[in-house]
Amino acid sequence: MSKHKFIVEFELRASPKVLFPYISSASGLQQWFAEKVTLKDSSTFDFSWDGDSHIAKLSQLRLNKSAKFDFLPSSPEDRDHNYIEFKMEVSDLTGSTYLKIVDYSDNTDESELNELWEDLIYKLKEIVGN
């Protein structure tokens, strides 16, 4: 099955310093992104959705800028693994922070992905006071 790269961007009225823990730490991600997030070691996260465990490595981290999670493949021959990347940029014009999300997975339904991420970001905005 081929993978699909879904990219979406949201404006948030919070600084990257405030948002960063919510995109890079187990406790922050658990508040809005997954039902449960456990840190296995310093760079291995266990994300739980609907009771299913999904192990991911924190493969990239730039302080107050970005975080990327590479999900471990379900089989050794699967070289094209899923990942989620969160990138923050501040607009010089408005001062707003833009959170860009890259969701690389088997899900090819653009409208479903759009709705999913809008719901997740709505929760994040409530937490950070948007």
Image (cartoon, grey):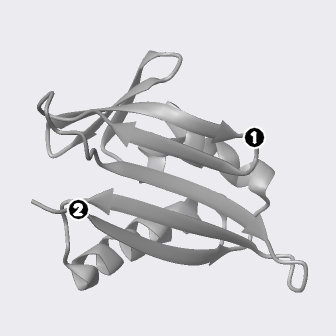
Q: Which residue is nearer to you in this view: 9 or 18?
A: 9
Nearest to N terminus: mark 1 or mark 2: 2
Q: Is residue 91 left or right of residue 54?
A: right
Give the distance between the C-alpha atoms of the residues marked 1 and 2, in whole angstroms.
28 Å
- At label 2, the amino acid type is Lys
Disc 2 is placed on an element classified as loop
Image-quadrant location for residue 75: top left
- Identified at 62% across, 58% down, the residue is 87
Q: Please determine whether, in this image, residue 49 is positioned above or below residue 105.
A: above
Q: Which residue is nearer to you in this view: 74 or 14?
A: 74
Q: Position of residue 9 (x, y in %)?
A: 55, 76
Q: Position of residue 53 (x, y in %)?
A: 20, 33
Q: Position of residue 6 (x, y in %)?
A: 37, 71
- Identified at 41% across, 65% down, the residue is 120
Q: Please determine whether, in this image, residue 98 is positioned above or below residue 81.
A: below
- At label 1, the amino acid type is Leu
- Identified at 50% across, 53% down, the residue is 85
Q: Which residue bears the numbered disc 1?
A: 63
Which quadrant is the N terminus positioned in?
A: bottom left
Q: Is residue 111 left or right of residue 118?
A: left
Give the numbered dot on residue 3: 2
Q: Please determine whether, in this image, residue 122 is positioned above or below residue 20.
A: below
Q: Which residue is nearer to you in this view: 54 or 29?
A: 54
Which quadrant is the C terminus positioned in?
A: bottom right
